[in-house]
Every structure is written in structure tokens, then in C-alpha cells.
Amino acid sequence: MAESEDNSNTIVSKGITVSYGPILALDNFSVEVPSGIVGLLGPNGAGKSTFIKAILGLLTPDKGQIKIAGHNPFTESAIVRDMVGYMPEHDCLIDNFTAIDLVSYLGQISGMKKRDAMPRSHEMLDFVGIGEERYRLISSYSTGMKQRVKLAQAIVHDPNILFLDEPTNGMDPHGREDMLALIKKISDSDKTILVSTHILDDIEKVSDHAMIISNGRLITQGNLDELLEGKENLKIVKIRGPEPAMKDFAKVLEDSYEVRSVILESGQTTIQFINTDGGNDLFKLSREKNVQLRAYYPERATLEDVFIGTLEQQNGGAENGN
Amino acid sequence: MGIDPIRYKPWSGERTGTLDRVFIIAKTFFLQKLKSKWILAFLILGIILMYVFNIIFNALMPHEALDAQTMSSQMSMGFVFSILLAAMVCSDAIAEDLRSNSFVLYFSRAIKTESYLAGKIGGAFMFLSLYSFIPPIIMALVLMGTQSGTSYGSSLGVFGYTIIAGFVATFFFLPISLLISSLTTRKSYAAVGTFMTFFILTIISAIFSDFDRNWRLIDPSYVLSIFYDWLYGLGMPTDIDAGLASVMFSGFIIVPFALLYLRIHMKGVGK
């Protein structure tokens, strides 16, 4: 832990509880956010925004503590906020500014001198793909352009930690791909980027790590590959051969393993089953049953499967508890 | 549009302090106001009607020194323009940030409620000083420059009071104007609301002052004119409670400021 607190990018929260009157927005919330791109997932009202506000020091928790790179956001808010960039979800740009003026203005409010802020703003607008449009009033911008300017204002002061709230909101498919590519590029400079979105596909494309929040609690978190691999060790085996032999093979598997599905199609059988061991038995069995083992691989769940499954488990647990 | 091939580059410059950041907010607000043709036109009209003619007239009139009576009367003359200008300048100071949700851009940075307010107040103060602070000082300097007597000591005393009076005149209407701007997301509502607030207070004061003269103290303009008379050493009206007058003077500044602070603070944390 001490090592991670020294890291200039780490967010560590321990037992944070935040309530709005009788509503518990964060309930004993503990998490350690690593460097890289981290997906923050959860249904509406799960506590994502409250968590971000607590990190920014805008809310004082009822109990618990948060450390941003070893700093307390409530007592050292100026230090913490200088190292944080925030791209809000909703419209927040000042319409009667041009993009270059706004990004430069916000850079100066973040502590940059004008002689640094102006060239840096041009660089960041170039980076996000705003060209000559930067000299036009923001009120004339499309949603996609506004998203790019929102990203530019969040990174103009080169924060170590970046919060992106629904960064691809309202963007067309091409714009979304661009935005995700930009996020990837930013992460190359060793930052912690917390991406909150309901488009799980986006998280899958860019994140290294994901956290799922529900009812103010951290339900699960982990490396994205581990989460997607699934805890059930779902595997797929594909065999070819005479139909009775394939049926025999499937029958033996059903006796020994938890088989989820058997699909016979175009002379090939695809069997989905749970296997916690290696695949040696399958090779042996295929020889015995005289079938060709064409493929054997772990079934990769989508993040959506993980998300829905986790929330269902959580809700089921809560109902049982009640 | 496409992605520009430029890579993300880190920045490692030196950071400025809080005061510099407050000044940026103030300066940007001031410069935005200078771009507004209507407000500029109104400012110029106010300066011409309230100051230019008076400066010329008083400079041409024989006078031995800069006298307190002249300056106190001058300071009390421009209330209507001061109120209208404050209403116009402050109307979008906070209402626009509320409408566009740009609060979050300020408060996700190292800007606290007091810094944000200081920036907005500073910007509005800079602009209003073009009407309420600088012209009285120019007038005082012109009258000192054209005085026939040699008693510059007393003139300098009045000049000093004029600096204080100009400062107060510029600042006095800001808290209420900004408070009303923070209560709506439409700048037109804020502008009309500010003017109507002062207007209604004046009407109520006029109605009830027949019963008790102290009712006049709920009129901010009257409170300010009493302040000028007191400041320039001309005495206070005998039928007015001096203690109550000072409470009202402070109240017109402190109460709206306290409410404004609470309002912005709550907005800053998303409540």
C-alpha cells in the first residue's frame, strides 16, 4: 500500500460513506485505482458521480478517507485539483467563448501562465482534432466537437489523473473511435484515466481495468482480461466426425462436466461447458470416441455479460438477504 | 476533422497562485463586458449625462477649492445609472454559468467558492469603476486643477474622501445584483430582477417613511447618500437613527454576500 500511495497517480479510498439525508450514496466504499485506463461502471444512481465528487473534494464524506497520490482531497484540495482533469458528461462549455479562448482561460485558471496556456491550448486542440473551428464561438459547434473541446480543457494543464464522464456521449461511430483513440494516446503518458460510461463496448476497447459499482458499493473490480475470462471457466470445444461418435463424445462430457450447450451444425459439434482443469482429458476422449478435436478455447464473455451477471448476483444476494 | 497525428505531450511549467487565477476570472469577465456594445453605449451615455456636463459646468464656475458639498451631491446624483449598470453588468455573471453548467469547470479546478466569487466581483467591480470610481476622481482632479484658491490641503482631503466614496459606490450594488444573478439561469430575468428589487425597496421606503422616517433606510440609494454625507463630514439627517443606518448599510452588503456564498457553495457541490 505504501508503495502505491507514493505513486503520483493512485487513488485510494478506504471505507468512504457519503449520504444525502436518508439516501446512502456511497456505502463503506473502499477501492484502490491503479494507473492506466480504468472503467467505472454502474447503473444510474450507483454512486459513480458521488465518488468522483468525493475525489475532487467537493463532498465531505460522513466517514472514511481518500488519498490522491498521498494527498487528502478535503484538506489539500488545491494540490489535488491541480493534478486532476475532469471532462463532465453534460454540456458545460461557455457558449460565448471561442474554443481557443475557453481552453486557454481554463488552463490559466488551472494555474498556467498566459504565455504557457495559449500555445498549450493550440497543441491540445490540434491533438483532439479541432482545426480552424477553434476561432468560432462554441455555440456553433456540433455535439462531437463539443466533446473534443471538453477533452481539451480537461487535459490542457496536463493532469496526472483524468476523469472522463461519458466521453463518447452523443458522438457518431467515427467520432467515437477517434475519441477512444485519443484516450489511448493520453494513457501512453503514464496517467490514471477513470472512464465512466454506460457504453460497455468503449470500456472493453480502451480499459485495462474495470470497477463495477452498485448501490454505493464496489461490487467487483479487476484486470479487464481477468474479468472477461470469467470466474466460471467457460470453455468451448469443437469436434468433427461421424454424428453418433460426436453424440457419444457430448454424452461423456455431460456426465463429467457442466455442459451449457451442444450445437450440431454442418458436420461440426460445438460444445460449451465449464472446465476448471486442463484439456488433456479431452484429447484422450476424442481419441477414444474417434472424433477430431478441431478447437478448444476459453469462451470470452463480453463486459456486458460480466456487468449484468454481477448486478444480477448482487440483486439476488440482496433479495435473499431480505 | 480526423485525428491529428500530433501526440499527447506532457506539460511541466510553473503553476501560478490563487490570486493570479482570481485575477484571470476577473479580467476575462471585464473584457467580455467591454465587448458588449449595448453595455458600452449605456456606460458612455451615463458618463456623459452624469459627469461630463457637471465637470465642465463646475470647472467653469468660480470655486476656491474642491468642496465636500459638490462632491457629495455629485456622488448621490448617479444612482439610477449605477443601479441600471450594475443590473446589466452582473445579470449574466453567475446566471450564465448556471445556464451552461460551467460551474463544474471552475470547481473541478483549484478554485474555491470564495475565489470564484472574488473573480466575478473583481470583474464586475473593474467595469462598474469606469462609471462610479474613475469619473468622480477625474472630476475631483479637474476641480482641484481649476480652483482659484491656494488651499490644496482641504481639497486633497475631499479628494481622499472621493476615492473612498467612489470605491463604495462601485461596490455597494454588487452583492444584491450578483445574488439575483445566482437565482436564475436567464440573464434577462436577473437584470430585470435586480432593477425591480431596488425599485420596490425604494417604493416601500417612500410609502412607509410617512409613518416613521427610519423606513427610508430600506432604500439602498438613500442609505448610500447618507453614507456620502457622513463621509464628507456634512452630518447625518437628524430624524434618522444613525445606528440603524449603519446596520442597514452593512446589511445591504453582508446579507446578500452571505446568501450568495451559500448559494454558490451548494451549487459547487451539486446540491
Image (cartoon, coloured by chain):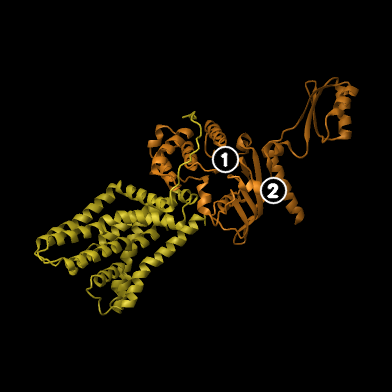
Chain colours: A orange, B yellow
Residue A94 visible to an observer of this rendering: no
Q: Nearer the viewer, residue A160 or B33?
A: A160
Q: Mark 1 or 2, which is nearer the eye? A: 1
Q: Name the residue under label 2.
A: A219
The residue depicted at 72 percent of the width and 46 percent of the height is A312
Mark 1 and mark 2, same subunit?
A: yes
Horizontal arrangement in the rendering, residue A289 relative to residue A6 (left or right): right
What's under tag 2, amino acid-wise?
Answer: Ile
Name the image quarter holding residue B80: bottom left
Rendered location of residue A67, percent (x, y)? 60, 52
Secondary element at tag 1 = loop
- The residue pinned by badge 1 equals A191
Residue A58 shows up from this direction: yes
Q: Where is residue A318 in the image (x, y as percent from the top left)?
A: 73, 53
Q: Callout 1, which amino acid?
A: Lys
Residue in view at x 25 percent, y 77 percent? B237
Q: Is residue A126 left or right of residue A236?
A: left
